[in-house]
Image (cartoon, rainbow, N blue to C red):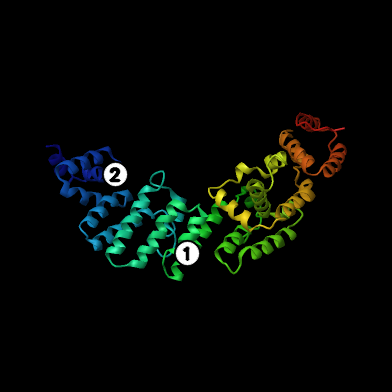
Amino acid sequence: MILAEFTASKEGSLWKTTLDNTSSPWHHIYMHLINQFAPERYLVNMRATIPQQWQNGLPVIEDFLAQQDYSQSLSVIQETLNALLQSSQVGNSWTPETSLLFTIVSRIHYSNQNGENEKTLLHYYQQTARGLGESERANALEIQKIAFTHSYDWSTMFQTFTEVPVSESIQQALFQSWHNYIIRRTKPRSYYLEFQGANAVENWWLHWLIDSIADSRKGKTWFQEKITSWLTNLPLDKAELGEEYNLLRLLTKDLIEIGNQPTNLYPRFYRVVIQPEKLSSADDKSRQTYLQQYASSDLWERVLTYWREQLHQFIPQPELAQKSDYTQHAQWMTALKELNPNNYETLLKQWRIDHRRRSNLWKAMREAGLELF
């Protein structure tokens, strides 16, 4: 019998290494045969391979749950979590009460498209906690499960943090985990600014929006005061703006898309300067819904005023063009003309003097539909 030969050969170092290797086709044949002809050994072998493939812990946990052996179930859950998180910074220090598992594994990868295996592991963990009489841990795991499906649905997450009964310290820890994750995923990345050593902005308008929703003592008024103060004190130079430049672009994108202003009002500005495709994130809909509720009625005009008055300073400089390609410069000039015709004319006059010999520049601008004289 093939299984008997495999079993006998497994004692040899070469075959043992091969048959214990989850990446080996021989391992899969061996496990299939065990499952078919020696099922009592199948789960024992599955448990031994958890460090290589954490998902192998799931059927083992399921079997212990069926036996209501919650102590053994918990032991295998920890082994499985250790394997799942071995490439993360948290290692085996993670607990359901300290941070959301979703925010950790999303930085690594899902075992499958929708994180179904991770959600199954959390479900088994919750069953185990209930079996052990740990009701608060079971409730914390309920938040964990919801976060896997609804992390980008702000309304559901706020409701979850409010309604699922856990201690204040656990609620705050899990809320902060979600809060930090959303901000990290939403914040526009600029490798150029990072390369230039621009100062990182640690507290910005998305922090204020989430905090104003979560804390009824702050609310709309506090958010509006914070964002108005920020806009009032924005530097007038792109280099000084640093990361705030992209944060302003994101705010502008959201204000345009929530319907306060149709995108076709300033289509070139929207496409060339804001570049919405580079700022999209999974929580766009939720973020914009709350921004629409919490923003003051004049926020769009304040943002637009900044762009109108300062956009001419952000136009790419022709002398820095690569290989005499001025396509980008021409596109930015169309955006400037659309937003502030007077500043466009002033800059055009300056370019006529400073860059009169750059024939490719003028060709690119004509091709962009700009009238130059």
Closer-to-camera residue (358/143)? 143
Nearer-the-camera pick, 296 or 86: 296
- Residue 8 place in picture, x, y as percent: 14, 43
The relative height of residue 232 versus residue 45 in the rendered view (above or below) is below
Q: Which residue is mark 2?
A: 22
Judge whether residue 331 can be spotted in this image.
yes
Instruction: Identify residue type, mark 2.
Output: Thr
Instruction: Give the image quarter of residue 202.
Output: bottom right
Using a 10 Å C-alpha cutoff, classify the residue at mark 1 as few (fewer than 14 neighbours), some (14 to 19) or many (20 or more): few
Q: Earlier in the sequence, mark 1 or mark 2?
A: 2
Q: Is residue 150 above or below residue 167?
A: above
Please name the residue that numbered disc 1 is placed on.
Answer: 162
Measured Cα–Cα span from mark 1 to mark 2: 43 Å
Residue drawn at (72%, 52%), measured in percent from left and top? 303
- Measured from the top left, where is residue 109 in percent x and y? 43, 48
Q: Nearer the viewer, mark 1 or mark 2?
A: 1
Name the element at disc 2. loop
x and y percent of residue 297 in the render?
Answer: 70, 56
Nearest the eye: 220 or 11: 220
Percent position of residue 252, x then y? 67, 49
Q: Secondary structure at mark 1?
A: helix
Q: Is residue 296 left or right of residue 24?
A: right
Residue at the image point whose x is 85% and y is 43% from the top = 342
Residue type pointed to by label 1: Thr
Q: Is residue 90 left or right of residue 242?
A: left
